[in-house]
Image: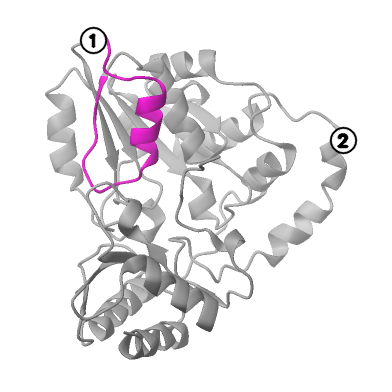
Amino acid sequence: MKEKQHGDDLFRYENIRINFSSNIWGHADLANLKEHLSHCLDSISHYPEPYAHSLEIALANATGIHRDEILVTSGSVDAIYLISTLFSDAEPIIPIPTFSEYTLASRRYKQGTGSSRKIYWICNPNNPTGLVCPKEKLLEEIDHSEDIFVVDQAYEDYTMEQMFLDSEVTMRPNVLLLHSMTKKYCIPGLRLGYVVGHRKLIQLLRDISRPWSINALAQEAGLWMQGKNVLPDLQWLRNETEIFRNQINQIEGYRALPTQTNFFLIKIDRKRRLASSALKEVLALQYGILIRDASNFIGLDDSYIRVATQLPIENTELVTLLEQIY
């Protein structure tokens, strides 16, 4: 059976010491959350709220929108597949390279088979490039179109650029905004995200969503983490990312591409260095370091890897190894 390949495949390896492959901050202090959830284990013997209404109310109150304008999902990917189901007749417009699930979900539900309407999938900040499309440019396109726009702001907490506010989306009938609590709170093992949009769009999504798709511990984590921050200072992270990029750009055979987040692509000169897949295996198996082989992003090939900034000492270790490995 052939499985779809994703980026952070830490589960495939033993003894990984440093994980550069995930875009999520790898040094979040989750001790208090773990302690809290340890007192909530009895909840797994009962059904959770079928549609996470308590969490929806908390999120709506925090952002100043109405609960009818928000839908909690089992991570952003759950939202992507729900939206693809709802707009299965619309033609998908997907820039490349970008997050592969937009294409995979569109293919599964055969988008573009019966309508002149289009649905634009916009990852902002974009994965894997780390670049941001200016909000003003997106608004100009959205406000002069009858097509649907899905703006995936999963990495909004990792950029200093201006992002959409929920209140800017709920008044517009043709845009849906995706948020990821997985990324915000560094809890990828607890699948948790939400969609914001005009209440008519949200109701259509709610009508096709599955009950009990968000488990009890994930709901509790989302409620308990409201107002808390586990990410480093954003200016510090931005500065360290630029230092990291500049160090890599000093190495013959590698070019770290510009970014506006904590992660970025590295272009490999294949005449001088290993292909992305081979480099990944050497680093993982010999040095306990995991990077992202970016060759399976549509539009990229085996001359691209992606890394996310870690602690300075860890970044320096990777830089040293990249200098040495041919």
Q: Residue at x 46, y 51 (%)?
A: 6
Q: CA distance from mark 2 to mark 1?
A: 45 Å
Q: Residue at x 46, y 71 (%)?
A: 281
State the image coordinates of residue 48 (x, y, percent, origin top left).
Answer: 75, 30
The quadrant in which residue 35 appears is bottom right
Residue type highlighted by circle 1? Ser
State the image coordinates of residue 129 (x, y, percent, origin top left).
Answer: 26, 57
Q: Which residues are magenta?
A: 91-115
Q: Is residue 290 above or below residue 174?
A: below
Which is more foreground, mark 2 or mark 1?
1
State the image coordinates of residue 218 (x, y, percent, origin top left).
Answer: 67, 43
On screen, residue 104 versus residue 206, left or right, reads left
Q: Is residue 117 above or below residue 77?
A: above
> Which residue has dot 1 on it?
115
Number of numbered discs visible in the structure rendering? 2
The quadrant in which residue 304 appears is bottom left
- Identify which residue, 267 or 50, lies in the foreground: 267
Q: Residue at x 88, y 42 (%)?
A: 42
Q: Is 84 inside the magenta-drawn segment? A: no
Crowding near pointer 1: few (<14 within 10 Å), some, many (20+)? few
The quadrant in which residue 63 appears is top left
Q: Are marks 2 and 1 in contact (CB under 8 Å)?
A: no
- Identify which residue, 68 or 7, lies in the foreground: 7
On screen, residue 177 versus residue 54, left or right, reads left
> Which residue has dot 2 on it?
45
Q: Is residue 268 above or below residue 292?
A: below
Q: Residue at x 45, y 65 (%)?
A: 21
Q: Is 100 inside the magenta-drawn segment? A: yes
Element type at marker 2? helix
Image quadrant where one finds the N terminus:
top right
Q: Is residue 127 above or below residue 148?
A: below
